[in-house]
Image: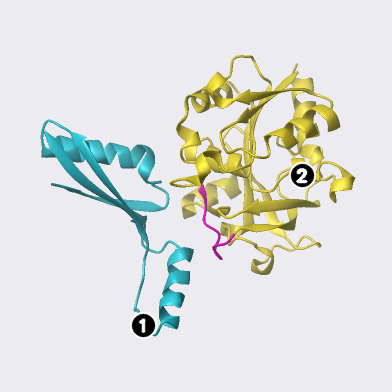
């Protein structure tokens, strides 16, 4: 089993993700400079957080149109796993691998804080180790994280169980008061049609060990590992 | 032929424009009441094309493929 973490110019969570995977979850992981393309047959590809291309034009817009993203699209089309975290989520939305867009926060400033998330889908390859309705703690750190999608897209996402996380309070109540960025329906994690691509704004790699304040994010990576093991 | 193309990319009607709201408030603090204020991004592009229609087509493709995100943006193109 091998994971690949794509590093763009301006990525800044790439090494944290590699650490969480290789040291905390003990899975072989390569850090891939985007110009090197996807040369190996990876079981999962992760697009980490950061500010690829300085967030010029729109966050993720330019990285989404690089050659390596063509490789990532092919990897996803073959049914393999892709996880986009923060800037990675913005790149996935801009590349069309997940619907909608993550755009400027309703109150337009950078937000960096711990949030609570309610698990809405616990049967995806990324969330099978959680239980339905679990409330988990992970940090967010973004200025462009407000999820926006047309009404028909939101309704399809809800109907097909493709919303993975919603911002909530510590008891799991989903209200506008605990929606940090104004995201539609408090959504902050969405799946592709085939459920093998997840775009999420919160940072599981920054919540993979208790010493960081939470180990709740680790189960994302562990779910992916278990999914790949069972598939093999 | 060379053409100068002006591309304006703005938010679709009804889309929340947090930057515009903040700017509108700042302008109000300077003593100016505004009925509405929207932001847009303007690109000035000089390009080679066979004719004006071809130049416009190229600019449309640029918008569709990169400059605008169709989920939230609309765009206007002027060719001279």
**Magenta residues, start to end:** A101-109
Q: Position of residue A122 (x, y in %)?
A: 75, 42
Image spot of residue B74 (x, y percent): 33, 52
Between A174 and B74, the one lying in front of the other is B74
Point 71% across, 49% down: residue: A120
Labelled disc at residue A214: none
What residue is shown at x 53% (from left), y 51% (from top)? Answer: A154
User: Badge 2 is on which residue?
Assistant: A206
* Residue under the point 64% across and 48% down: A201
Q: Nearer the viewer, residue A162 or A74?
A: A74
Q: Quadrant of residue A203?
A: top right
Let me know if residue A108 is in the magenta part: yes
Q: Principal SS element in the magenta part? A: loop
Q: Position of residue A115 (x, y in %)?
A: 74, 57
> Chain drawn cyan, letter?
B
Image-quadrant location for residue A11: top right
Measured along the vertical axis of the image, is residue A117 above or below residue B28? above
Chain in yellow in the render:
A
Tell which residue pokes out farthest to the bottom in this image. Answer: B31
How busy is the neighbourhood of tag 1: few (under 14 within 10 Å), some, or many (20 plus)?
Answer: few
Q: Which mark is residue B32?
A: 1
Label 2 chain ID: A
């Amino acid at each position: 089993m091998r994971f690949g973490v794509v590093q763009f110019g301006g990525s800044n969570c790439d090494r944290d993700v590699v650490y969480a995977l290789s040291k905390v979850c003990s899975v072989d992981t390569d850090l891939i400079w985007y110009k090197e393309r996807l040369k190996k047959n990876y079981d999962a590809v992760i697009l980490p957080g950061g500010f690829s291309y300085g967030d010029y034009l729109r966050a993720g817009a330019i990285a989404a149109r690089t050659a390596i993203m063509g490789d990532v699209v092919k990897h996803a089309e073959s049914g393999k796993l892709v996880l986009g975290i923060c800037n990675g989520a913005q790149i996935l939305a801009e590349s069309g691998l997940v619907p909608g867009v993550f755009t400027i926060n309703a109150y337009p400033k950078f937000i960096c804080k711990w949030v609570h998330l309610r698990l809405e889908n616990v049967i995806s390859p990324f969330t099978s180790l959680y239980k339905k309705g679990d409330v988990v703690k992970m940090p967010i750190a973004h200025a462009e994280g407000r999820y926006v999608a047309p009404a028909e897209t939101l309704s399809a996402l809800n109907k097909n169980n493709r919303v993975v996380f919603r911002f909530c309070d510590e008891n799991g109540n989903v209200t506008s008061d605990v929606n940090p960025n104004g995201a539609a329906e408090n959504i902050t994690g969405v799946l592709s049609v085939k459920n093998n691509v997840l775009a999420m704004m919160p940072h599981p790699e920054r919540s993979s060990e208790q010493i960081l304040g939470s180990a709740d994010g680790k189960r994302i990576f562990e779910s992916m590992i278990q999914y790949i093991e069972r598939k093999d | 032929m060379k053409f100068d193309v002006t591309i304006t990319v703005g938010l679709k009607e009804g889309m929340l424009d947090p930057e515009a709201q903040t700017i509108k408030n700042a302008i109000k603090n300077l003593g100016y009441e505004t009925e509405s204020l929207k932001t847009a991004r303007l690109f000035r592009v000089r390009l080679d094309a066979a004719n004006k229609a071809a130049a416009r087509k190229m600019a449309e493709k640029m918008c569709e493929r990169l400059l605008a995100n169709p989920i939230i943006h609309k765009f206007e193109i002027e060719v001279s």
